[in-house]
Amino acid sequence: MRKPMIYLLAGKLWKDAFRSKVMVIALGLMVFLLLFSTYSGWENYHDQNYTRDVMQDKVQQSWENNPDKHPHRMAHYGSFAFRLKHVLSVFDLGMENFVGNAVFLEAHKQNTVNFSEASMSTGLLRFGEVSLAMLLKVIVPLLIFYLGFASIVRERENGTLKLLISQGISRKEIVFGKWFGLWGLSLVFLLPVFLVVLLFVLIESHDSLYADSLLRFAVLFISYILFFAILSAITILVSAFSKTSKGALVKLLGIWLLFVIILPKSLQAIGYYLYPTPSKIEMETAVEHDLIKQGDSHNPDDPHFKALKDSVLLANNVKQVEDLPFNYGGFVMAKGEALSTAIYLEHQERLYKVYTKQNNLERNSAFLNPYTAIKNLSMGFSGTNFQSFLHFKDKAEAYRYKLAQDMNQLQMDFIPNKGKAGPNKISREYWKAFPPFKYEFLSVSRVFKNELISILALMLWSVLAVFSLLKVSTNLKAI
Amino acid sequence: MYRLLFKSFFRTKIFFVSLVLLLTVGLVSICIGKQYLVKQEQAIVAAQEFQKESIKRNIEYHNDDLGLLLYYLRFTLIKKPSNISAISIGQSDVNPLLQTVTIRGLEGQKYDTDFENPSLLMSGNLDLGFVIIYLIPLVLIALTFNLYSEEKELGTWRILAAQTSGKSKFLYKKLAVKMLFVFVVLIFLLFMAKIILQIPLDRRYLVILIQSVLYSLFWSTLCFFIVSLLKSSSFNALVLISIWVVLTILLPAMVNNYVLNKYQVPEALNAMVEQRDGYHNKWDLEKEATMSGFLEAYPQYKKYTVPEDKFSWIWYYGMQHMGDITAKETSAEMTEKIMQRHRVNEKVALFVPTMHAQLSFNTLAGTDMVSHLDFLKALTKYHESLRLEFYPKIFDNNPADTIDWKVHNAKFYTPKHEFNWVYIILPTLLITLLITVFGRFNLRKL
C-alpha cells in the first residue's frame, strides 16, 4: 500500500462528501444537536448536583443541631444520602434518570432509593434522551452509513472502479483509502463532542478526581474512535459487496436498526422474561420470614435472643440484665441490626444476581453487536451505569449501618440500664463527632473490571474490521 | 388487477421478512405483557398474604398495646390492575402498583418504589405499544419507499405508463395492497392481544384499536407523500428513515430533556427532609407544639388529655402527623410540577403523532403519570381513613382484640379511566388528512 494513494482516495471521499447535501444537512443537524445536548446535559448535571449538595449540607446541619438526647432517638432521626452525578454524566446520561436519587437512612430499615427522574416523568421518557453520547452512539452511525454507503458500489456502477484499477491503483489501496476517508469524516463529528466534554472535565474535576476523570475521558475517547472505525469498515464492506448502491443503503439501514434498536431491546426483554424477579413485597416477606427463623428481637420468647441473653449474663457474671456494665437495650439492638442487615443484604444480593443475569444476555451480545459494546462501555466510564448506582447504594447502606451501630454503641456506653440511676440523654457533641455522608465515585480500576467484556468485544471488532477489509481487498469485483 | 398486485407482492422477500418480523415480535410483546400481568397478580397475592400474616403475628406480641401494634402493622392499597395495561406498560414499571403503609407519617412512605432492574427501565418494555409505535412504521417504510422508484429504476414504469390509463391510480392500488397487509397484521395482533391477555371488548380497547389504525394511516400517508416527490429509491429510504429517527427518537427525546430541565423538582427532596424534621423536632419541644397543630386538623380528639411529663400515643401519632403537615405544601408543589411536565408534554404531543400515540396509549391503558398521581391521592385518603378509624381506639387504650381485624384486608382502588375521544383521535387524524392532501397534489404532475 502506498501512503500518498491512500491519502488521495481518502481526500476524494472527503471532497465528495462535503459537496453532497447529506453532509451539509448532517453537519447542520449535528451542530444544533451538539449545542442542545451540551446545554441540557450541563444544566441537568449542574442544577441537580447543586440541589443535592445543598440538601446534603442541610441534612448534616440539622443532624448536628439536634439537642442532647437519647442516642436511639438519633438512630431514628437518621440521615439522608443524595446521589451525586459524575461530571461525565454530561456526556452520557446512561441510567441517570432511571435510578433513584435520595434515600432516607434510619435504624432497623433499608429504605428504597426514591425520586428517580423517571418516577416523576410522563411516558415520554421511554423515547429515550438526548445526550452527547447518544448522538455519537445512535445518530452518527446513521450518518456514517449515509455518507459511505455508495463509496465503492457507486464507483463500480459508474465504471470508475475499473478505471482506478487499470490506472495501477491496487484494490487494497482503494478499500483502505475509502475506509480512512470515511473514518476521518466520522471524526469530524466526534472531535467537537470530545472537546466540549474535555472542557467540562477540566473545569469540574478537583484534585484527586482529576486523574480519574481524565483517564475515564481518555478511555471513552479511544473507544469511540475505535467504534467509528468499526462502523466505517462495516460501511465499506457492505458497499463493496453490494450490487447496487440502493441495495447497500437498504442493507446498512437494516444493520443500523438491528444493532441500535431491535437487538438491544429484544435481548433485554428476553433476559427479563427468562429470569423473573420478585416484587418488593415478595422479597420483604422472604426477608421477614428468614429473620423470624433466625431470631425475632420483637418476640420476648425468641430462642435466639434468649440464648444471647444467657450467654451475656454468664460472661459478665451477673444475674440480671440490669446489672450488666453496659446498656442491654443498646446491645440487643446492635445484635438485631447486624442480623437483619445481613439477611437483607443477602436477599438483595440474590436479587442483583438475577438482574445481572437479565442484563448479561444483552451485555454479552457485544460480540455480535458493536453498539452494545460501546453503549455499556460508555455508560460504565461515564459513571452512569447500574454498577455506579449500586456503588452509591452500597455506600449509603454502609453509612446507615454505621450510623445505627454507632448510636447503639453510644447507648451501650452511656445510657444506664433500666432502674439504674443516670441521665437518659447524652451530649450533642457526639452528633458532631459523627462524620457526614460523603460519596466517592467508583474507582477506574473497578470500572475496567466491570466493563471487561465490552472492552474485549470492542477490540475484537476492531481486529475483525481490519481483517475483513484486507480480505475484501483481495477479491473486490471491479465490475 | 388487485389479484395480480397481491400475487406479486406475496412473492417478494420483503413481504416475507415483514410478516415474520411483525408476527414474532408482536407475539413476543404480547407474551411479555402476559408475564407483566402475572407478575402483578403474584405481587397482589403476596401483599394480601403479607398483611394477613403480619397482623396475626403482631397481635400475638402486642395485644395489650394497640399504639405499638399499629406502629408495626402495614396496610396495603392496590391499584386494581386491568389487563389492557399489558398493551402499553407505560410508567407502571417505574411507579408501583401497590403501596404498603403504616399509619405513621405518610410522606415518608408514599414514594417508596418497587424493585425493578434499571437496565430494563432504560431500555423500556417491549410491549405491543412499542411494536405499533416503532416497528409498524418501519415496515411501512420498507414496503413503500420504492413504490414508484422501483418501477422507474427497473425500467418497467414506461411499459406500465403505456398500458394503464391512470398512472397515479396504479400507484394508489399498489399502495393499497401494502397498506392492507400491514393493517391486517396490526388488527390480527391487537386481536391476539385481546384473546391472550383477556382484555374485555370495551371502549378503551376500541379506542386503542382506532388510535393504532390512525397512527399506521399517518405513517402510510407520510411514506406516500415522500413517494409522491418521485425521487430515487435511495433518496426515499434515506429521507424516510431520517424522518422516522426524528419522530420516534430525536424529537420526543429533546422535548423530554427540555421538560425535565425546565421543570426540575427539587421539591421532592425538600419534602422528604421537611417531613422528617417536622416530625422528629417535636420530640424536643413542648407537647403543646405538637398538639395544637394536630388538634387543629382533628378537633374531635380534644377530649383526650396529653400527659406533659411522659410518653403518650396521642402525642406520638400527633408528631407523626405533624411531619406530613409540615411537608404538605412542598409535596403539593412537587405534584404540581409533575402535572406541569405532563401538560407541556401533552401539548407538544398534539403536533407529533408518535408522542401522541404513546401518551394516549398510556392514558387508555391506565399506565400514565396522571393515573399514578390519582392512585397516590387515593392512598392519601386511605391512609387518613385508617388513621381516623384507629386513633380513637389507640387513644382510649383499647386492646387489639376489640378490633375486627378480618375487615382489614388489602384494599383495592379502582382507577377512573376517563378520557376524551376527540382529544385522542383528532390530532393524528388531522395531520394524516393534511399530508394526504399534499401527497395527492404532488401526484397530479405524474
Image: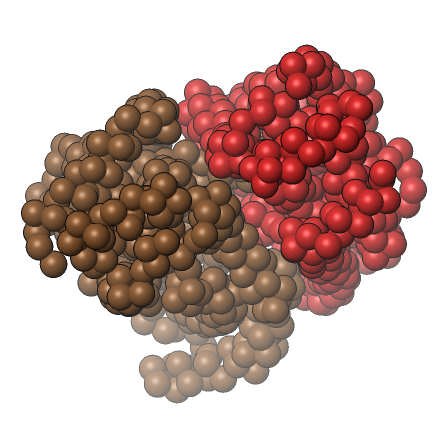
Residue A274 image offset from top left, x and y in percent:
61, 69
Q: Residue at x 40, y 57 (%)?
A: A241
**Rendering quarter of residue B247:** top right
Colour brown, chain:
A
Colour scheme? by chain
The picture quadrant where one finds residue A373 is bottom left
Residue sitting at x 58%, y 22%: B229
Image quarter where the N terminus of chain A lies is bottom left
Residue B148 shows up from this direction: yes
Q: Nearer the viewer, residue A441 or B429?
A: B429
Residue placed most toward the observer, B294 or A193:
A193
- Quick one: which residue is furthest to the right in this view? B201
Left or right, residue B79 beside residue A408? right
A68 up-or-down from B162: above or below? below
Residue B375 seen by the camera: no
Say whether residue A261 is left or right of residue A177.
Answer: right
Which residue does the image show at 71% across and 28% down from the upper left? B161
Q: Is residue A282 above or below residue A140?
A: below
Q: Which chain is red?
A: B
Q: In which image quadrant can residue B1 be found?
A: top right
Q: Nearer the viewer, residue A383 or B429?
A: B429
Q: Which x, y percent locates residue A250?
A: 50, 46
